[in-house]
Image (tube, rainbow, N blue to C red):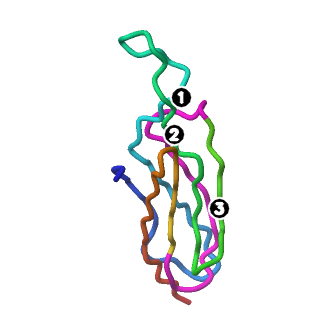
Amino acid sequence: MARTLINAPSTAKRGEVIEIRATIGHPMETGFRPGEDGKTLPRNIIQRFSCKYNGETIFSAELFSAISANPYIAFHTVATDSGTLVLSWEGDNGFAQTESISLTVTA
């Protein structure tokens, strides 16, 4: 399991634009770099990232080997209803992780 830092407001006013930020602890090995023994290290990257707000996808990204280690992803959405933001990512070797945060929307 990757260490993850998610920064998003827990409350917002209806119609307010909110920012969601995530930093995912992951080495992101490109598959092009040689190791100490001279052999190419196997690729190990996060390939897909998505965020669903009450079940509807509001953001998604496909990542490639040029992405840095411990990727930082930030995006915005409009607070419409109270509910859950579900952030998911998956990568090489069957790696997958999901984190959820609650959002309370007030009038």
Residue under the image location 44 percent in, 48 percent down: 23
Residue 102 among magenta residues: no
Residue 8 locus on image (x, y percent) = 46, 64
Of tags 2 and 3, the one toward the viewer is 2
Which of the 4 quarters of the picture holds residue 37?
top left
Q: Which of the labelled discs sits on residue 59, or is there none?
A: 3
Q: CA distance from mark 2 to mark 3?
A: 19 Å
Above-or-below relation of 45 to 97: above
- Label 2 neighbour load within 10 Å: few <14, some 14-19, many 20+: many
Q: From which residue to which does the magenta span run?
A: 65-84
Question: Looking at the image, is 85 positioned above or below residue 43?
Answer: below
Residue pointed to by mark 2: 45
Q: Residue at x 43, y 72 (%)?
A: 101
The amino acid beneath tag 1 is Thr
Label 2 element class:
loop
Task: Write down the quadrant of residue 66 in the picture.
Answer: top right
Q: Residue at x 38, y 44 (%)?
A: 25
Badge 3 crowding class, 10 Å Cα cut-off, few under 14, some 14 to 19, many 20 or more, is: some
Would residue 10 be found to the left or right of residue 73 on screen? left
Q: Nearer the viewer, residue 94 or 68?
A: 94
* Label ID, residue 95: none
